[in-house]
Image: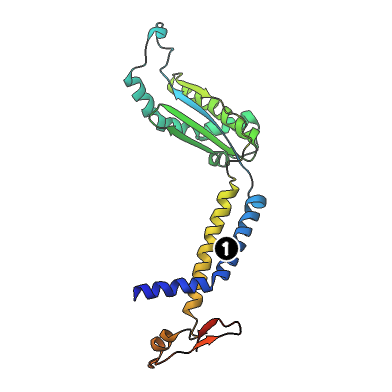
Amino acid sequence: MEELDLKKLISIFWNKRLHIILISLITVAIGTIYSFYFVKPEYEAYTTVVLVKDATKTESSSQETITSSDLGLAKNLIGTYSKLVKSKSTLRETINNLGINESENTLANKITVSEIEDTAMLKITVQHEDPVQAMKIANEVTNVFAKKVAEIYKIDNVYTVDQAEESITPCNINHIRDILIFFVIGLVISIIYVLVANMFDTTIKDADDIENNTDLITLVSIPYVNENNRKGGIY
């Protein structure tokens, strides 16, 4: 019985294959138009900073080495430093230095601070519709952040490893991915449509439909042959 039901289900989808193809093509067309003409490109720029041992405390600092406790302290500060990067004072000074017309909250939403795994390093990423502005903000917010650390903690342990560079490739546009997503959406919609349409379809298609929906028993079936001498159904 389960095998028969599966065959019937496959038959239902096969008979509605044109509907499935049409709906999928329509959603692919919508996805293509959306991806190429409606997605506003945005660009990413990032800096990486490492938390190093303060070399200003001792005169013989050039001969000292970084110990595991120094690295442990640096890692413990990463959480605090991440919050400091997006603090109002840091963002306000960055806005003033660059003369940009954005609020602190708006700028904060464009900045992401992440820890580079198993290191004492931070990655400060800025996403902006202007690639040059993204680069400038990333570099400036990093400089202001380093200065804030020196002012608050009286140590100079933030070292910029990578300066932000201008990106030429949008970070939020992937035409193939967008089209595939819309194709999957169209496929799901078409499958739901076929199942719902079949659910409300009360027409008799085979002998099983007669027995399942009435008290009658099918004794014989006569195949219908069309003009091309092909079997078209059972009546």
Residue at (52% x, 63% y) in the render: 187
Quadrant of residue 139 within the rendered picture: top right
x%, y% of residue 216? Answer: 39, 93
Say which of 191 and 82 sits in front.
Answer: 191
Farthest front residue?
A: 229
x%, y% of residue 172? Answer: 58, 44
x%, y% of residue 205? Answer: 48, 84
SS at badge 1: helix
Question: Where is mark 1, residue-wise?
Answer: 24
Vertical comparison of 123 with 68: above or below:
below
| Residue count near mark 1 (Cα–Cα under 10 Å), binned few <14, some 14–19, many ≥20 | many
Q: Is residue 26 left or right of residue 116?
A: right
- The amino acid type of the residue labelled 1 equals Ser
Say which of 196 and 84 sits in front.
Answer: 196
Say which of 213 and 77 sits in front.
Answer: 213
Instruction: Tell me the quadrant of the picture where the N terminus can be found.
Output: bottom left
Vertical comparison of 119 with 101: above or below:
above
Q: Is residue 46 left or right of residue 212?
A: right
Say which of 47 and 10 sits in front.
Answer: 10
Q: Identify the colour scheme used.
A: rainbow
Quadrant of residue 206 within the rendered picture: bottom left
Q: Is residue 134 left or right of residue 153?
A: right
Residue at (47% x, 78% y) in the render: 199
Q: Is residue 32 visible?
A: yes
Number of marks in the rendered image: 1
Q: Is residue 152 visible?
A: no
Residue at (44% x, 30% y) in the render: 81
x%, y% of residue 72? Answer: 34, 25
